[in-house]
């Protein structure tokens, strides 16, 4: 995890030989946080040529490590604390970090499950940040998913 702009912690994965036009993705984390699954997904996107960043939305919450966890219920109390006011600046910081490094690129937002809800909520009205959104099995449910 890397600190960026003192706003948040983020995991990054870069393709080989990135340049100013490298396409980029902000990957919204799932309920388990920035765990091995999210890091592996970011690396797969990087292997496909996308600069990818995963903001840690549980930063400063003392959430458990999601690596190896199978019971999402341990993470629900942390997910329920996420609000638009805490999530949006971190997603914007990730998009800005990518834009500074890849100024000729279009960026996308993507997410799985809880992160998919976050991506879906930013599929419209974020043209200053994102040219596309991809949602995998995101469902609007009782988890806030700002």
Image (cartoon, rainbow, N blue to C red):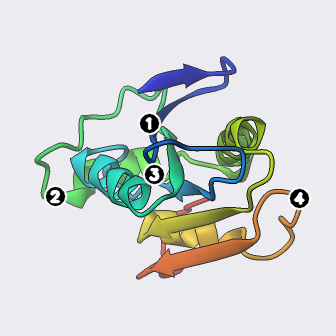
For image coordinates 67% across by 24% down, the residue present is 7
Q: Kindly report the distance in space between the C-alpha atoms of the residues bearing marks 4 and 2.
A: 37 Å
Please rate how many residues cluster around mark 2, counting C-alpha atoms within 10 Å: few if below 14, some from 14 to 19, many from 20.
few
Give me the disc on residue 79.
3
Q: Pinpoint residue 65: horizontal percent, then vertical percent.
A: 24, 35
The answer to whether residue 65 is left or right of residue 3 is: left
Q: Nearer the viewer, mark 4 or mark 2?
A: 4
Q: Nearer the viewer, residue 20 or 43?
A: 20
Q: Nearer the viewer, residue 60 or 89?
A: 89
The answer to whether residue 106 is left or right of residue 141 is: right
Q: Kindly report the distance in space between the C-alpha atoms of the residues bearing marks 4 and 1.
A: 22 Å
Q: Of marks 3 and 1, which one's residue comes earlier in the chain?
A: 1
| Above or below: residue 59 compared with residue 15 | above
Please rate how many residues cluster around mark 3, counting C-alpha atoms within 10 Å: few if below 14, some from 14 to 19, many from 20.
many
Q: Of marks 4 and 1, which one's residue comes earlier in the chain?
A: 1
Give me the disc on residue 71.
2
The residue pinned by badge 1 equals 11
């Amino acid at each position: 995890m890397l600190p960026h702009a003192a706003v948040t912690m983020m995991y990054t994965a870069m393709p080989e030989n990135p340049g100013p036009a490298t396409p980029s993705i902000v990957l919204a984390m799932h309920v388990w946080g920035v765990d091995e699954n999210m890091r592996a997904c970011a690396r797969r996107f990087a292997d496909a040529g996308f600069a990818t960043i995963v903001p840690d939305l549980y930063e400063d919450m003392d959430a458990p490590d999601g690596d190896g966890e199978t019971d999402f219920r341990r993470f629900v109390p942390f997910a329920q604390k996420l609000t638009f006011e805490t999530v949006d600046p971190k997603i914007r910081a990730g998009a800005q970090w990518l834009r500074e490094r890849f100024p000729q690129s279009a960026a996308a937002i993507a997410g799985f499950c809880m992160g998919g809800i976050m991506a879906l909520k930013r599929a419209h009205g974020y043209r200053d940040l994102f040219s596309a959104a991809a949602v995998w099995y995101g469902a609007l449910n009782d988890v806030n998913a700002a």
